[in-house]
Image (cartoon, grey):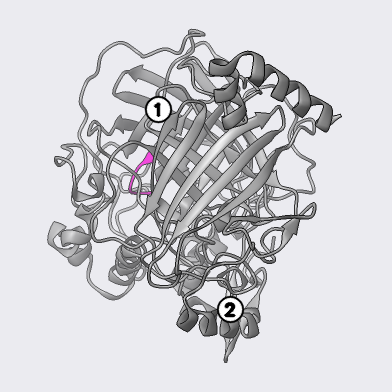
Amino acid sequence: MRAGLAVIALACAASLPAFSQANAKKGAAYNPPRLADGHPDLNGIWEVRAKVDADLEGKINGKNIIVEPADGKIPYKPEALAQKKDNAVKRATADPLNKCWMPGVPRLMYVPYPFQIVQSANQPVMPILSQYVHVIRNINMGGEHLDGLDLWLGDTRAHWEGDALVTDVADFNDQTWFDAAGNYHSGDLKVAERFTRTAPDTITYEATMTDPKVLSKPFKIRVPLTLHTEKNFQIMEYECFAVKEGPTFTVGDKPDPQHGR
Amino acid sequence: MRHRKTYMKMLQVKTTLTILAILSPLSFGQGGGRGQGGGRGPVNPLLNGNPYVSPQEIKGGPIPRLPDGKPDLQGAWLQRTIGNSMSMYSIEKTSGHPKTQIPATAGIIVDPPDGQIPYTPEARKKQIDLGENHMVEESDAHCFMGGVPHSMFTPFGMRIVQPPNYVVFTWEFMHSYRIVPLDGRPHVDPTVHLWEGDSRGKWEGDTLVIDVTNQVGRTWLDQSANIHSDAIHVVERLTPIDSNNLKYEATIDDPKLYTRPWTVQFSYSRILDPKFEHLEFACIEGEVDMGKH
């Protein structure tokens, strides 16, 4: 069925060169619902429904999560690979998620928790509200990066390119990881993302990571985000409290002797 | 991280230094002032250096409206109270507590008229004990969300966004948020307890009425250890007065701890600086101190 549609798309592209080729190139055959300002409506509760956070160097349905470079691997500088391997060994205590910390970007978008995109026409901010430890990621529409700050989620500046929401994220700290496998970055990380509604229940999420301190060249991931369509579905809460006990963290709800739950 | 430090500094100031130190704007210095548009835009006249002090009132124009005619409440807001009553310290009217170093405040309780929560005697005893001897149990200190109505008067500003079928509140403080569906869906099952509770909204004329249930019993209403149980039921009424001002009222009932429902009231001033943005509030990240308690 999908192959059949592709053939039809190709046939159209051949017969209507200017219009259809542009569409085929963008993969923008789907015309999304729109808000009053004409931009695609990204509102909804979304979640990655594939195993991505475990290891970015893995696959979804047989395809590499990392689409560039072609080998599907993160192009670490030789001297940076040792740190990744060390992180992997120590991940039980070193993974920021095992300490309830903010996951950083792009990781927030594919940790296995739902998030709600809160978009309203002509607003300066499009908050993304994650169920993971009530993290708020503010997508600032326009404006300039902040000076002299380093942030767990970085500073996001976004604009629309056609029907794609395009971001430029900078001002990161060096404390977050890309995944649970210990893949990591430095504070020089920059992330460029594209959110594109490609089907009624799908946002195709793409992110390109640049980090000259750790990477020999940029790499790009492509991950489908799936819309929750269950009746009355809502974001619940994942509160997380980590207690440091000696060298390790105990994660869980802190008992409360004073007034119970 | 700076926010966290500023807030912890406030807690520290509150518990270890004098009341004079708290009230002096100098004790907040740069820390409190940094909420002003990330320091990039012009200073907002509504933002004080001290986030515990109310902004001034500035009259606005007609109530903005969405295409469907409902009030457009979107934008950034700060709590405003009569006489800078500093609700974070105490929502009750108080002449100050020498032992807990909570300063004198007018409070925000308008019913009962004495400005006091109508606790049962046992609940009042517990509240006094928590405030004097167990401040470490304060939910904010553990980076938990504040619950309702506490979250509605946390410092550093509140943002409202109205996507179709929802009203959404976000705060810089503790990166708390509330998502209020307007589609008439029922509350979640009573066995579910949430730090920010379960909110359901509807419009009554120009007033947004929000029914809040399913809260945990572990959040405090302020830093004076004013408490509620998991039976708390809150009905909020948010009404635009003009383009710059909102009126907030909440009636709070909890048959486990109070003898009757009671009501708080305050206002919000719009943050007029168009460059104002919420920054990041890191709390649990790197925190090791609270694990010791």
- Quadrant where the N terminus of chain B sits is bottom left
Pinpoint residue A165: horizontal percent, then vertical percent. Answer: 48, 34
Whether residue B232 appears in magenta in the rendering, the answer is no
On the image, numbered disc 2 is attached to which residue?
A243
User: Which is nearer the eye, A174 or A123?
Assistant: A174
Q: Main secondary structure of the magenta part?
A: loop
Circle 2 sits in a helix, a strand or a loop, which is it?
strand
The magenta span reads B154-158
Q: Is residue A70 visible?
A: yes
Q: Earlier in the sequence, mark 2 or mark 1?
A: 1
Label 2 crowding class (10 Å Cα cut-off): few <14, some 14-19, many 20+?
Answer: many
Residue placed farthest to the right in the image? A1
Q: Who's the residue at 49% across and 12% down the image?
A: B70
* Chain at numbered mark 2: A
Q: Which residue is mark 1?
A: A123
CA gap between label 2 and label 1 equals 39 Å
Taking depth in this image into account, of A142 and A8 the one nearest to the observer is: A8
> What type is the residue that disc 1 sits on?
Gln
Q: Nearer the viewer, residue B29 or A204?
A: A204
* Relative vertical location of residue A214 with respect to residue B112 in this rendering, above or below: below
From the top left corner, tell me how far across and down residue A102 is, in percent: 52, 62
- Specify the amino acid type for callout 2: Val
Residue B113 can be seen, yes or no? no
**Residue B270 point in image, percent of width and height:** 29, 30
Q: Is A28 placed left or right of B23 in the picture?
A: right
